[in-house]
Amino acid sequence: MSETIVQLEDVSVFQRENLILNEINLEVKKGEFVYVIGKTGSGKSSFMKTLYADLPLKQGKGKIVDFDLKTMQEKDIPFLRRKLGIVFQDFKLLLDRNINNNLKFVLKATGWTDSGKMENKIEEVLEKVGMKTKGFKFPHELSGGEQQRVAIARALLNDPELILADEPTGNLDPQTSVEVMKVLQEINENGRTIIMATHDYALILKYPHKTLKCDGSKIFEVIQKAI
């Protein structure tokens, strides 16, 4: 595995026929934490969707965790996503089952079969996000912050090389956002690479990292000014 996790050269991002972003050149190395910021509608989510192959890469060159986004076939997408952890704004937990079974569902879907190993893995990831005692609860019994912690635990199940977090604090109040951010920080400090789309500027100032801005169909690095 190379030290470069994401490499984009002259990439354009399309939604169907509409050009959203163009001339993207980006390198993300192992262990980096990168923010993607920009107004609603500036292309943050389309950019993230291109990285996890929800939107096809039509123009430019793109490699992510050693997969070529340009030449990728439909059948390769599940294998790419096993090397990624994806965290969404709206948690995407299955409401009809408890947290342990939510996580077990993902493990089974990605090829795990040994129930003992699955239980150990579930316990390990829930411990990482401070939710070890909550596995028997159903999503509706948890606060928004707790649900997002579970979503982060789910993203860690297959030891991803890269975590893509798309507005992970978008539905949370400021205090809860900070708690979730601390979890992501810790995961990053343990060597995981994270790309996080956000419009929460307070968090960016509190936890400064490399920051890319989507604006006027371009992505460029911005230098954060301390306030």
Image: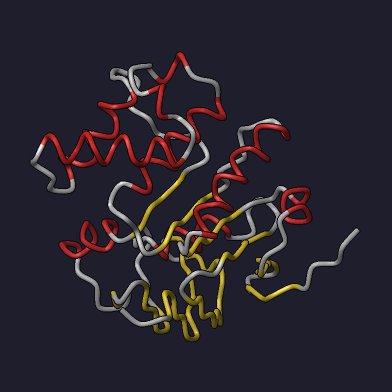
Between 208 and 75, the residue placed more toward the observer is 208
Q: Give left or right: position of 174 versus 161.
A: right
Residue positioned 67% across, 59% down in the render: 37
Above or below: residue 99 compared with residue 222 = above
Coloring applied to the structure: secondary structure
User: How far from the left and from the top, in percent, is residue 136?
Assistant: 33, 17
User: How far from the left and from the top, in percent, is residue 22?
Assistant: 55, 77
Q: Residue furthest top?
A: 141
Between 191 and 108, the residue placed more toward the observer is 191
Between 163 and 14, the residue placed more toward the observer is 163
Residue positioned 37% across, 17% down in the render: 138
Between 162 and 55, the residue placed more toward the observer is 162
Above or below: residue 30 compared with residue 93 = below
Q: Residue furthest right?
A: 227
Residue positioned 28% across, 19% down in the render: 97
Residue positioned 35% across, 23% down in the render: 135
User: How far from the left and from the top, in percent, is residue 3?
Assistant: 41, 81
In the picture, residue 62 is in which quadrant? bottom left
Q: Give left or right: position of 99 versus 104.
A: right
Report the quarter where the N terminus lies: bottom left
In the picture, residue 122 is in which quadrant? top left
